[in-house]
């Protein structure tokens, strides 16, 4: 079974600085997809970024980028120029495709951006 | 305009009652899900339906019964509610493609008293 581990329950960062959230996963699959979701206090689940395992290039979405290390099974999220609105729970998630339709989530990292 | 809508957003009820949560998606997706988020914010899948067929049933008590009348709807009925059922329940949908991009509803906070 796939597992997703987020080793940082809480993190904080000063506004305008850069922060990196860690995620590791365990799978025997070769083709899969990885996601970072953001859950602000409004509780809405918002897709931040996704990465296909077959792509070597790291995904980037504006201030958000990932460092995908397939051999190490690591998928970290870097947030540049942190903003107050980035304060939220961040979840790393794994999907292996095929007939397994489910997303497996990590336990989340609570990120607080301080003014 | 809401892509995945759940009703109600909040539900407070007494132990032993039966309640339902409704979910509708207007994205044309072929797969719908129910996830449970516990008090520690951990998200875990409960059920998945693909084209109205049950695909995943993750060791959920049989007091929970999903119903999918069509591809756009997936409702969750809970019998004999218990205190431990208190959680946030998320509906989600996705479309089979080269990758999975889930769209979540805004969640239903269920409180059993």
Image (spheres, coloured by chain):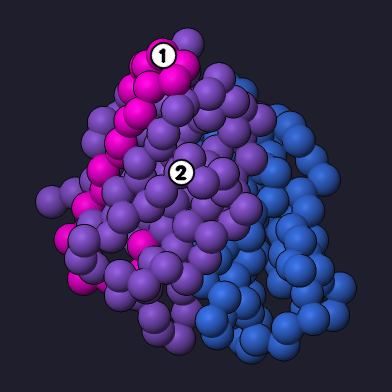
Q: What stretch is highlighted in magenta?
A: B11-32
| Image quarter of residue A31 | bottom right
- Above or below, A110 relative to B73: above
Specify the farthest residue to the left. B1
- Same chain for mark 2 and mark 1? The answer is yes
Please name the color used to draw chain B.
purple
Q: Which residue is drawn at 47% across and 79% down?
A: B99
Decide whether residue B26 is among the magenta residues: yes
For residue A45, side relative to residue A58 (left or right)? left
Chain in blue (letter): A
**Callout 1 secondary element:** loop
The numbered mark at residue B89 is: none
Q: Name the residue under label 1.
A: B14
- Above or below, B35 relative to B80: below
Q: Which image quadrant: the N terminus of chain A?
A: bottom right
The numbered mark at residue B64 is: 2
Tell me where residue B11 appears, x and y as whole percent: 34, 22
Q: Which of B48 and A85 is in front in this view?
A: B48
Q: Residue at x 78, y 74 (%)?
A: A27
Q: Residues within 10 Å of mark 2 (few under 14, many from 20)?
A: some
Tell me where residue A60 appears, x and y as whole percent: 54, 67
Q: Residue at x 22, y 53 (%)?
A: B24
């Amino acid at each position: 079974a796939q597992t997703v581990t987020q080793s940082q329950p809480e993190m904080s960062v000063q506004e305008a600085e850069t922060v990196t959230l860690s995620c590791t996963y365990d799978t025997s699959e070769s083709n899969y997809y990885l996601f970072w979701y953001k859950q602000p206090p409004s509780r809405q689940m918002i897709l931040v970024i996704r990465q296909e395992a077959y792509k070597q290039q790291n995904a980037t979405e504006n201030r958000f980028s990932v460092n995908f290390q397939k051999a190490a099974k690591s998928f970290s999220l870097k947030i540049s120029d942190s903003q107050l609105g980035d304060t939220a729970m961040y979840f790393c998630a794994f999907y292996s495709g095929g007939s397994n339709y489910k997303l497996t989530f990590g336990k989340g990292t609570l990120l607080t951006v301080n003014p | 305009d809401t892509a995945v809508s759940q009703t109600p957003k909040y539900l407070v009820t007494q132990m032993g009652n039966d309640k339902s949560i409704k979910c509708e998606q207007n994205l044309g997706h072929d797969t719908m899900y129910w996830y449970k988020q516990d008090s520690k914010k951990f998200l875990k899948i409960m059920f998945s339906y693909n084209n109205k067929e049950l695909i995943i049933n993750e060791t959920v008590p049989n007091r929970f019964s999903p119903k999918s009348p069509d591809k756009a709807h997936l409702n969750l009925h809970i019998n004999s509610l218990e205190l431990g059922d208190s959680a946030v329940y998320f509906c989600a949908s996705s479309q089979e493609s080269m990758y999975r991009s889930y769209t979540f509803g805004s969640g239903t906070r269920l409180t059993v008293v």
